[in-house]
Amino acid sequence: MTAILEIQHVTRRFSGLIAVDDVSFVLQRGEILGVIGPNGAGKTTLISLISGTLTPSSGDIRFEGRSLARVPAYRRARLGIGRTFQIMRPFPGLSVLDNVAVGALFGRRGGQAKLAQAREQARAQLDFVGLGGNVDQRADELGGPGRKRLELAKALAMQPKVLLCDEVMAGLNLVEIEEVIEVIRKVRDGGISILVIEHVIKAIKSLSDRLLVLHHGEKIADGEPGSVLANQVVIEAYLGKRRT
Amino acid sequence: MKRLRIAFILAALAVLAAVPWFGSDVLIQFGINAMLLAVLAQGWNIIGGYTGYASFGNSVFYGLGSYGVAIAMVQWQLPFGVGLVFGVVLAVVFAVLLGVPVLRLRGHYFAIATLALAQVMTAIVSNVKLAGQNIGLVLPPLNNDPLFYELSLGLLVLATLTIFWLTRSRFGFGLIAIRENEEGAAVMGVNTTLYKTLAFALSGVFSALAGGIHAYWVTFIDPESAFDISLNVKMIIMAVFGGPGTVLGPVVGAFSLSAISEFLSSEITSLAGLFFGVVVVAAVVLMPRGLADMLRRFRSMGWRYFAENIRTHRL
Amino acid sequence: MDLFGQILINGILLGGLYAVMALGLALVWGVLNIVNLAHGAFIMLGAYVSWYLYTYAGIDPFLGLPITAVVMFAIGYAVQRGLLNLIVRAPMFNTLLITFGLEVVLTYLAQLAFSADFRTINPAYAGNSIVLGPVVLPVARLLAFGVAIVLTVGMWLFLLHTRLGRAIRATAQNLVAARLYGVEPRHLYAMTFGIGIALAGTAGGLYGTVSQINPYIGAALTAKSFAISIIGGLDNPLGVIVGGLFLGILESMTTLYVGSTYADVASFGVLVLVLIVRPNGLLGKAA
């Protein structure tokens, strides 16, 4: 397996606060990498660094072997990096279909030129995530789970090579979580490498090929899910040190 | 249903185009003013309504268009058409040079920067010899109101068609995406800097053309009148009142507000300006999403529509 | 060299006036997040109030400032409580638009009420100057400067050290918490805006002693106040002093060395520069 995404000693500071601290790891082609950690561990910051919304204070991020330094966010999207947002912000004035169509119009390699084709693609993606029946609704009329799927469809419409998922399962019930897991697996089977941030440990354990744990901005574990979750350091990070 | 709409619009256009034949001189002049204002409102609609960057300084492009025509015709003896092109070039250059730094600013900072720019233009141009400095320029007279009327109408149709094109083009979708969620748009692959600047320049093109036609029509410009700051209020309120981010909203807003203002100013002159201010204030409180939205929701909600708007936005 | 010194002093004195002009705007903007495009119009109103007090009641413009302040406070409170409070939760653009409209209304009302003539407030001592070595200090400008500094520092102390000041800042940060504090936000917002307008009105009264007033000065003063607030930075209440002095000196220098019509151009140029390079202002955090 080759690495499609390499994070090399990336640090990000916010006037005194270190959000991401010397983190290094790789995302292999075709794998699902889970990222977990307590709140404030730096997970969303990490995704923002990869998608280009933020730039690292130091360190390098490489995509398909090439450095992303000084590559603006929109160009990264065209190279094939797609992301979903944790705080779901659909384009409220647009319909569900048109929300996804934006992704099709602008994604990889600049996307579609014609609106009609973009809408067709959007329809396909919405069917894929299970929102086929909602295409003409206003995006802000969708409920929470619907919005999560919309986020996913938008990102997929960009035809990404790498998909960064930021907490797509938060607030879903067990059945909905199973459905999302299925969708993500289908996405991976389509050839896309996925990085998933999640809080729902059970879900991410069954979904991920590998697991990464962040705590206070540092990487404290990286490996096979079972062993990572049994790791004492990881347990302490979540539950706090046991007082003897 | 759609065909009915198109037929209606075409009929309205035909009536409008025919006005110079059966209308009075006063009506023709009112028409020219109203249509040029509608063009300005549509121009603003591109950058403010669709891209979400509320420019308070489009009067700058209007003035540049005016001076473009005036300088070309008076100083260089070039024809009107060339003057128009020159004015547009000035506006586009300006939009790009100043747009790139200023469009990096968030909403209200952008508004302030454009407002400040609008304030300064009068002072700057007063120092330019080529523009006639403080005294201004007198253009060669052309006494043909019907011609200017049809020119204005043509420009308005062009502007409105452009907006219509926006609603179904990749470029337009990019602008809407920027308006709704700029960070999200960038992450999805929209080159936000490029698109914002293009939108700004496009709005400048229409404003400049309107300014150029107006200058030739009134035959005289000076810094104060060309860079008239009150135009900013008018174009914004017309676009917002009629419905920002819609195809016909600004046109409806421009025509209706012009008509009411004309009616009022035949009573007391200074009331026209006061009227605009009051309309702005009332509209922002009672119908912040414009006439289009009000007409749509009023049918189902009645007077509650206004109360609802206040309730959602009040402290 | 003497001329340079004089211009510098002129700039500093002007800067003080500019500082108090921008103070009300910066307060309302920084604390309430209300961008008041009608700010200049309120300065204009305050100038007229002072003018009327002086012309018809014979009250010295400087001594009468508290009266002007109270009158303008009442107007500001009413405007916020009755009008602006209605759109506080709306998108920022609505605030811009409504205050824009307010500016138009105020200007036209002033034109109707006061006519378009130029007026000045000219107490007997206005023409006097104090000579300090090589520089001449006009009394009116010196007094204006003094009042400006007192007000600005006073406002800074007020916000940081008084109960009301802290309540205002708390409300700005967090409406819910403020309610728990026992504060009524509508009243507090109106108080804050009232203070901001009182400051604007006071600035107007000072402005009237050093320059001509007419109903149309509002727009230009608004633009200037914005430039000062942005250049100085909104995070620190003392920012307006920095911004005011900077702009005052810049304008004086530009008038002398380049030409008076370029003074506005220079201010605008600096404004745009600051917005691009250091959007939080000279006293603000680095972006």
Image: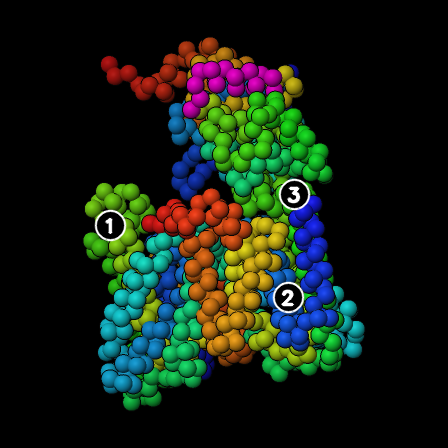
Q: Is residue B187 above or below residue B144?
A: above
Of B138 and B147, which appears nearest the observer?
A: B147
Residue at numbered disc 1? C184
Q: Which sits earlier in the primary sequence, circle 2 or circle 3?
A: 3
- Do pointers 2 and 1 mark residues of a single chain? no
Element assignment for label 1: loop
**Within-10-Å neighbours for mark 2: few <14, some 14–19, many 20+:** many
Residue occupying image coordinates x 58% and y 26%: A133
Amino acid identity at mark 1: Glu
Residue at numbered disc 3? B1
Residue occupying image coordinates x 40% and y 74%: C109
Colour basis: rainbow
Amino acid identity at mark 2: Leu
Q: Which mark is residue B36?
A: 2
- The image quarter containing residue C76 is bottom left
Residues at circles 3 and 1 in contact by the CB criterion of under 8 Å = no
Q: CA distance from mark 2 to mark 1?
A: 47 Å
Of A199 and C197, which appears nearest the observer?
A: C197
